[in-house]
Amino acid sequence: MNKLSKYKSIVFDCDGVVLDSNQVKTQAFYNAAQSFGNEAAQMLVEYHMKNGGISRYKKFNYFMSTIIGKGTDGDTLEALLALFAKEVKKGLLHCKVASGLEILRKQTKQANWMIVSGGDQDELRDVFSERDLAKLFDGGIFGSPDNKHIILEREIRCENIQLPALFVGDSKYDYEAANRAGLDFVFLTELSEVKDWDAFFENKIVTIEKDIMSLVYKDEVEE
């Protein structure tokens, strides 16, 4: 991939990009919904995986209104969200951080970095602080309840995101949000839960890479 020196801002999704946490969240959705039975829990997992990048609030609202419907015994929406949040935070605190992240930060000193995620904003900020990762993202850490479209539009308007800018993500929604906001896009394949990504991106102007380490300028990495 060409060097990233032209970008004034670089935006990262969190799950499957900066943290190896896609499986953490997939399992948490299943576990949280088990009070409604295994079939319903699996349907929520399938909806989650098909809609990577959108917030847990929208996913659980869909689960309660469409998959479950009214009059079904089980946990309340608030209880589901609480169960999910407890399990996810534990997983986020212990999952693997992307290799090459700090090297890439040193190689892109000209750009401000930020997280724009479908994850809960307060939860993300706590986790990144506890894991000493917040220092890398001088542009801020942003998440739900605002969606990615709203966050990107707001941060461009207030000039926190300066163009040209790059979005690094692992979902179709990441691409759609970046494209709508006028950001270039890199899709990372290694941890993505998008099964048909090759067909989806076939006629789209994107860069496809394996992982964060693939973005590092290899000739500048010290032996």
Image (cartoon, rainbow, N blue to C red):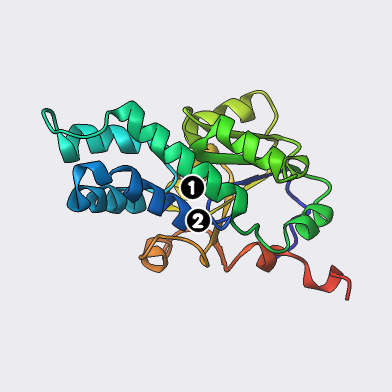
Farthest residue to the right: give it: 222
Residue at the spot 47% in from the left edge and 61% down from the top edge: 192
Locate residue 54, reporting x and y percent: 41, 40
**Could you say which quadrant of the image residue 56 lies in?**
top left
Residue at the spot 33% in from the left edge and 38% down from the top edge: 59
User: Tags 1 and 2 in contact by the CB under 8 Å rule?
Assistant: yes
Question: Could you tell me if residue 14 is visible in this image?
Answer: no
* 50, above or below 195, in the image: above
Residue at the spot 56% in from the left edge and 34% down from the top edge: 123
Q: Which residue is mark 2?
A: 170
**Could you say which quadrant of the image residue 218 lies in?**
bottom right
Q: Amino acid at mark 2?
A: Asp
- For label 2, count other residues whose C-alpha is less than 10 Å away and answer few (under 14), some (14-19) or many (20+): many
- For label 1, count other residues whose C-alpha is less than 10 Å away and answer few (under 14), some (14-19) or many (20+): many
- The quadrant of the image that shows the C terminus is bottom right
Residue 197 is left or right of residue 77, and the answer is right
Mark 2 element type: loop
Locate residue 94, reporting x and y percent: 61, 53
Measure how far apart labels 1 and 2 are at the Cα level.
7 Å
* 89, above or below 82, in the image: below
Residue at the spot 36% in from the left edge and 65% down from the top edge: 196
Question: Could you tell me if residue 76 is visible in this image?
Answer: yes
Residue 129 is left or right of residue 27, and the answer is right
Mark 1 element type: helix
Farthest residue to the bottom: give it: 223
Farthest residue to the top: give it: 158
Q: Amino acid at mark 1?
A: Asp
Q: Which residue is mark 1?
A: 174
Residue 104 is left or right of residue 17, and the answer is right
Locate residue 151, reporting x and y percent: 55, 30
Of residue 96 and residue 173, the one placed in the foreground of this image is 96
Locate residue 221, reporting x and y percent: 84, 69
